[in-house]
Image: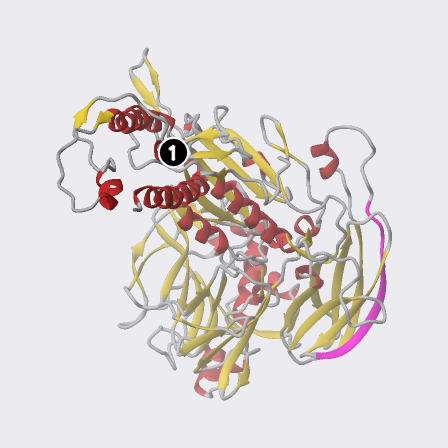
Amino acid sequence: MTYLTPILAGVAAAIAIPSLIILYFLKLRRRNVEISTTLLWKKAIQDLQANAPFQRLRRNILLLLQLLILGGMLFAIAQPQISRIALDSQRHIILIDRSASMSSKDEPDGRGGFRSRLDAAKEQALALVASLREGSAFATAGVGGGDEAMVIAFDASAAILQNFTSDKARLSDAIRAIQPTDARTSIEEALRLVRAQGKQRVITDTGSNSTITSEELFSDDNDLALHLWSDGRISDLSAAKPGPERTFEYHQVGKAESGNVAITSMRAERSFDDPKELSIFVGLQNNEALERAVDVELRVNDTTAQIRAVLVPKATMPIQGGDAASAASAITPGVGGTVFKLDRPEAALIQVTLRQPSSPESPAGDVLATDNRAWLVVPPAKRMSVALVSDGDLFLESLLSVLRLSKVDTMTLAQFEKLVSQGKSTDYDVVVLDRVLPKVGLTPSGLPPGRYIVYGSIPTGSEAPLQTTGEAGPQGFLHWNREHPVLDGADLDPVTIASSRQVSIAPGGGAVTLATGDKGPLILEVTTPDTHAIVTAFHPLDSTWPWNVSYVVVGASMVSYMGEGFEQGVAARMVSPGSVISDRLPSDAKDITIDLPGNERESLALSPDARVTFGPVGTAGVYRMTWDGSMGPSDITVGGRAARYFTANLLDGAESDTHAASTIALPNKNVEAVARTSSDGNRPLWPWILMGALAIIMLEWFVYNRKVQV
């Protein structure tokens, strides 16, 4: 048993108890009273008023009852409680994992069934909150102060749901509000938030009179305790760097032997020789020490197309011996898969589902349902046609010849301008302008309608988004947008440019910079209602770019990106939960909405460069974006509106491995899981003591009334 405010109770007792006893030492001074009958003597001689000290203390049941009442109230002021959880710190950070694996249902619910790991973690965290020591109304610095806590929920990202407070109701509400997500687990951002809560340690170099501070030094707080609720399936534990002075408790939820079979990869590919032949590759994983037989169902546009029986190999379990942390990481899941082949030239929404053999139910013994389904958006079969407008470029012609294109027509500028005049230039998916610019059929962008890749020339005009201000001279690449599909995976550092053009961008003109050099933009993207173009402010032959592998990578990406109508193909339509959906729509798109898997709908806004974003995505499933306006090549019509589908899938072998870890490996030590259940917690006794005191008050009232009754 512990007491939160024993000093306060002792001071109150030293004053109240002697005061009560002194009242019973007072002696009654008798006074003459005339009465009409002796029947009233009994009432007249009652000690109703004490007005003269002192008399010998006599046995008195009222005194005994009042002492019991006063003692109980003083005992309640001390705030006694039964300590089932020993809390040494006064400040606590509650970290709760809400990632996909925490939706595994292998925790007993007390009714013969199972509940999710997250539900069990929340119940245990609520018990910890209930055990926090409450402060006194008379608390002073260091005396009678209550415990404080904050709540952080994390998956691929992290969020503070409740800042430090001693209000247990607010802490409990924050914990109950945590919802599961289908995102992966990453603790790095959560621990960055933790480090920011500690007291900053400052190191002063007396020799140089300099002060050094570092994020790594946010750990000088020995009164801060970390409580982590997770199943231990955390891939970036190496980033977990709590200070050596801090208490770090790991609370395991889930069972180490829980079995799960999952879809861990999925992709689509069309045949090079015959694009209407579609292959769907599905990768599977099994984390049990026995083979698992499952049925894999393929649905096309919500209609069952094929079902395959697949035997997934068993997992390789670690050799007995060694520490628990290394044993958990040594489990090697069994991997397998299957391939579906379809003859489908049209676009399709593909869904793959794992089922129990010969049954529509989920695989038996499978604790995680999130990874039993995956979706994929497949664009229609198409080989792009490209027009190369050039006076001759061996490197460019060789690049286009090796791409999967239906045709490449090389022509002069005069021939292309004739096609523009005839309205036939848009018959090509992409037009590559090599150091030339057409002068007919121009739009405000400085180009005719269509999709272009422009090397070494800058389309200008009175209303054009781009303007040139002269020569920029030699330079190199300084920065480029590695997240853009054109420059994804490109290494432009080795490229040296001998000559280039100085380019400026008109505000609000629909142009953005994709790569910059020492003296200004080098690769730009222009988006207007009639045109879409990638423009380079230099020509590749005026640089070392053609002798670098990035020339082929970026060139192929530009053709694919432009030819697919602002899309990146299948990969762009598939995201991981926890990430952001980002895509370009036609620039005239209006009233944009996105339908979520839970039948919810949200409105979106189009940025000046025709990009739209949504996220982070929390739930796996299909997301449908609709708008009023033009359609892309692979978009469809739904209810009279243009529509585009996106899919969110877990597809993470580490997250689908549902073996809960009893030990987690921090950079400086291994931490064993704390054995604790939701029934643990400190139980305050003062409410019961006050109820007992109230009962004694009622008894004292009864005895007193009997005593004074005539």
Q: Residue furthest front?
A: 37
Q: Amino acid at mark 1?
A: Ile
Residue 247 place in picture, x, y as percent: 51, 29
Q: Which residues are magenta?
A: 303-315
Q: Is residue 314 magenta?
A: yes
- Residue 31 seen in the figure: yes
Residue sitting at x 30%, y 43%: 708
Q: Provide the residue designation for mark 1.
A: 61
How many numbered circles does the render carry?
A: 1
Residue sitting at x 16%, y 26%: 52
User: Eyeballing the image, is 314 above or below 583?
Assistant: above
Residue 5 place in picture, x, y as percent: 37, 30
Q: Quadrant of residue 309?
A: bottom right
Residue 44 place in picture, x, y as percent: 21, 40
- Residue 547 seen in the figure: no
**684 or 656, which is in the foreground?**
684
Q: Quadrant of residue 281?
A: bottom right
Q: Is residue 650 magenta?
A: no
Disc 1, SS: helix
Main SS, magenta region, reads strand
User: Eyeballing the image, is 653 above or below 58?
Assistant: below
